[in-house]
Image: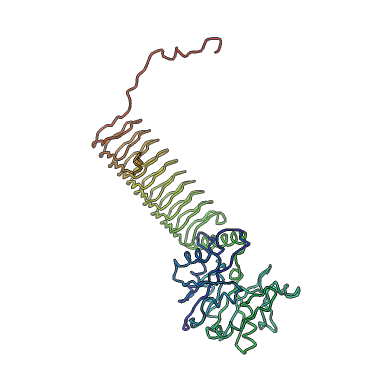
């Protein structure tokens, strides 16, 4: 686009109908604050100057918005949408201006790019973006005469006949900056709400001889979130879009309706995703991975042919090729599994480097540890990493160690290569390479001891 593009995002509303203490535009859609979705769409459309108008709980909205390349402006005394636009200090804005609501998370960059091309082709000075919907509800109606837009009428001020119109205002506008600077100050609050409606700019533009048009777009562009039910719908649409995109890339998704994958997640072709899986954040998986039902994965890196079995919870961990986890395993942050390593059911790892072809089959906890290659961790093994001094200590287990069941490794402790630890041992000292460590009390059998506690025959 030859003309410089700026964007004004209106995000000052209270969102009363959300019935939530969180500002409306900060509610997540597929794991991302909806204000971020709108900002990303504007950035993707080519906007260089993005201004976010904040109001209700402005400090929170600013903190979240300022993560991205935007500038925030406060609407000190909210008096309607035109007043909100004015709060963005329009005197310093240049080029073409896109005005969009911050609670429209289904808008995509390609929608805006298409509308920008259409606007330039129309040679218009001002355009409102419209959509046809089956249930317009409280959306402003587009009034036309001989096909040309005449006005936008707010639902609160519309007659019964006007309310029958199904073409609605999406809340998006494209306007040349000089036209915006001229018309915005002329908007009056002569309406039932005593507010300055941005919609009045359409009538003003036509009255003063500017070329004004209405560009019809798809219904998702007009979809705004005002209630928790509408937020749930936005989530469903976002998750469906992501599943469709992944399936187009060769990912097998058994049931897209019950699969939840956030926008930034990457999955390689040939991978299989079962129902109930939730993949979050910056998770990236290679080809031919398998995600069994109800696994929950956050910010993890998975190589090729990794298997995550049912009910497992993985967070900020790295899994190399052909490793497997679960069912019902937990990997906490800073855990790394080597190639072909296996973590079984009810095993928890935290900050562990777990070597190639090593395995912990079931019912174990390993924390703050380094585990070499080819190690067997027996059932019930625990690294006792948290001491009475409230510090955490490290356990180091070398290659090809065999650890029996019900072993406690009291850190700091090291186990040498090829060593064996007998079941039921509590290990507090270093174990040399290839040694057998037995750290348990000697068994004593007392003959006929149980006879003392035998009940009388009449009680049997």
Count of number-bearing discs = 0
Image check: 354 left or right of 271?
left
In percent of width and height, residue 354 lies at 34, 46
Which residue ends up furthest to the front in the rendered image? 77
Q: Residue at x 58, y 67 (%)?
A: 13
In the rendered view of the protein, which quadrant contains the C terminus? Answer: top right
Q: Determine which quarter of the picture holds residue 392.
A: top left
* Residue at left offset 50%, top offset 63%: 60
Q: Which residue occupies the extreme top position in the image? A: 457
Residue 159 in the image, given as x and y percentages of width and height: 75, 75
Pick out the residue farthest to the bottom: 209
Vertical relation: 235 (above or below) 100: above
Measured from the top left, where is residue 165 in percent x and y?
71, 74
184 or 325: which is nearer to us?
A: 184
**Foreground residue among 96 and 53:** 53
Left or right placement of residue 348 versus residue 247 in this view = left
| In this picture, residue 410 sits left or right of residue 187 | left
Q: Position of residue 120 (x, y in %)?
A: 53, 83
Q: In terms of depth relative to the viewer, which is nearer, 46 or 34?
A: 34
Position of 245 relative to 422 (above/below): below
Quadrant in the rendering for residue 399: top left
Q: Is residue 272 among what the camera can see?
A: yes
Residue 29 seen in the current view: no
């Amino acid at each position: 686009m030859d003309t410089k593009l700026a964007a004004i995002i209106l995000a000052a509303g209270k969102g009363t109908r959300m019935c939530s203490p969180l500002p409306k535009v900060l509610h997540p859609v597929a794991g991302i604050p909806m204000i971020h979705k709108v900002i990303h769409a504007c950035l993707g459309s080519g906007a260089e100057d993005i201004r976010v108008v904040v109001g209700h709980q402005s400090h929170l909205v600013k903190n979240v918005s300022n993560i991205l390349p935007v500038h925030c402006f406060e609407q000190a005394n909210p008096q309607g949408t035109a007043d909100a636009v004015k709060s963005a200090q329009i005197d310093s804005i240049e080029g073409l201006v896109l005005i969009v609501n911050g609670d429209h998370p289904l808008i995509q960059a390609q929608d805006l790019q298409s509308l920008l091309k259409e606007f330039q082709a129309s040679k218009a000075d001002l355009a409102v973006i419209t959509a046809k919907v089956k249930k317009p509800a409280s959306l402003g109606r587009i009034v036309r005469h001989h096909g040309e837009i005449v006005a936008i009428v707010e639902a609160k001020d519309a007659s019964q006949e006007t309310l029958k119109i199904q073409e609605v205002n999406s809340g998006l506008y494209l306007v040349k900056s000089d036209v915006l600077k001229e018309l915005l100050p002329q908007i009056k609050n002569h309406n039932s709400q005593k507010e300055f409606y941005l919609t009045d700019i359409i009538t003003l533009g036509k009255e003063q001889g500017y070329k004004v048009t209405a560009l019809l777009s798809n219904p998702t562009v007009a979809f705004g979130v005002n209630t928790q039910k509408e937020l749930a719908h936005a989530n469903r649409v976002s998750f469906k879009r992501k599943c469709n995109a992944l399936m187009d890339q060769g990912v097998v998704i058994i049931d897209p309706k019950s699969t939840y994958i956030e926008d930034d997640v990457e999955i390689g072709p040939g991978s299989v995703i079962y129902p109930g899986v939730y993949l979050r954040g910056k998770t990236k998986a290679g080809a031919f991975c398998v995600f069994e039902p109800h696994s929950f994965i956050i910010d993890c890196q998975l190589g090729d042919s990794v298997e995550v079995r049912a009910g497992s919870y993985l967070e900020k961990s790295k899994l190399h090729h052909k490793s497997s986890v679960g069912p019902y395993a937990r990997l906490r942050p800073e855990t790394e599994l080597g190639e072909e390593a296996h973590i079984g059911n009810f095993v928890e790892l935290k900050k562990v480097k777990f070597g190639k072809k090593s395995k912990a089959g079931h019912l174990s906890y390993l924390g703050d540890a380094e585990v070499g290659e080819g190690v067997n961790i027996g059932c019930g093994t625990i690294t006792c990493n948290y001491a009475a001094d409230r510090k955490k200590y490290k356990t180091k287990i070398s290659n090809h160690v065999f650890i029996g069941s019900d072993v406690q490794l009291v850190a700091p402790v090291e186990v040498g290569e090829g060593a064996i630890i007998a079941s039921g041992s509590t290990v507090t000292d270093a174990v040399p390479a290839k040694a057998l460590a037995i750290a348990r009390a000697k068994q004593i059998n007392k003959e006929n001891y149980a006879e003392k506690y035998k009940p009388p025959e009449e009680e049997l």
